[in-house]
Amino acid sequence: MKKIIMGIAAVISVLSLVACGNPPPKPDMYIEKAELSQKEEDIAKLLGDNSDQLIYDFRLDDTVQSVQINTYRLTDGEWRMISGGGGQQFSDEKGRLALDFENIAEGLRVALQSEHNSGSTKYSSEPAEEFAGMGRATSMLSDLTEITYEKEIPLVVQISTAQNSINSYNVDYFFSPDEYQKHGYEHVYAITVLFSQKTVGELDTEN
């Protein structure tokens, strides 16, 4: 009996090792934090200015037509867009997205790179309110996330407040803005990405 039990235990151990060595397959379309080589990390540090830098890899299919990177400010419990909306033409099946920012209220730089697309845009503004002395908490997408066309994916949510403590939230709470509102945070900003099967012209018509 002891030999039988030991044999079953050995089989379970082998199966566990096999399962650990084979991570689940990725979905057909997804976005995830990029795994940078040492050379790429060195370049990113060289170009950075002590700000938060996020780099994501994404994979799509051949029906993609455009991409939007949108920035929002939480106002009276609702997200109000402050940049983005129009989108840009994009038809490659994979690429890399980089976000460079410190205080989202002051702006950010967005860069896209793929086989046929390469470029960056920068949004900047002078905040009407003073942020000096405020604490800041920034949540960023860290897990692999499946892409669905026409659906926004929150990449960053940033809270700035004079309160003594700030609750930490997963970026998925972007879809529950009341959760931020109930704490009375003075400033809440978000960055999202949306991949679309619609052309830029079609998106402009909708807006």
Image: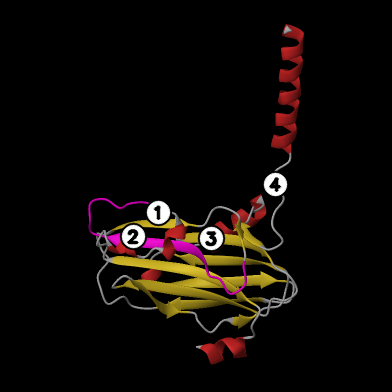
**Of the residues under marks 2 and 3, which one precedes in the sequence?**
3
Residue marked by disc 1: 169
Residue marked by disc 3: 54
Alpha-carbon distance for marks 2 and 4? 32 Å
Amino acid at circle 4: Pro
Query: Who's the residue at 31% across and 70% down the image?
Result: 77
Alpha-carbon distance for marks 3 and 1? 18 Å
Q: Nearer the viewer, residue 87 or 100?
A: 87
Residue marked by disc 2: 179
Amino acid at circle 2: Glu
Above or below, 92 against 175 in this view is: below
Q: Position of residue 49 (x, y in %)?
A: 47, 62
Q: Are marks 2 and 1 in contact (CB under 8 Å)?
A: yes
Alpha-carbon distance for marks 2 and 1? 9 Å
The magenta span reads 148-169
**Of the residues under marks 2 and 4, which one precedes in the sequence?**
4
Residue marked by disc 4: 24
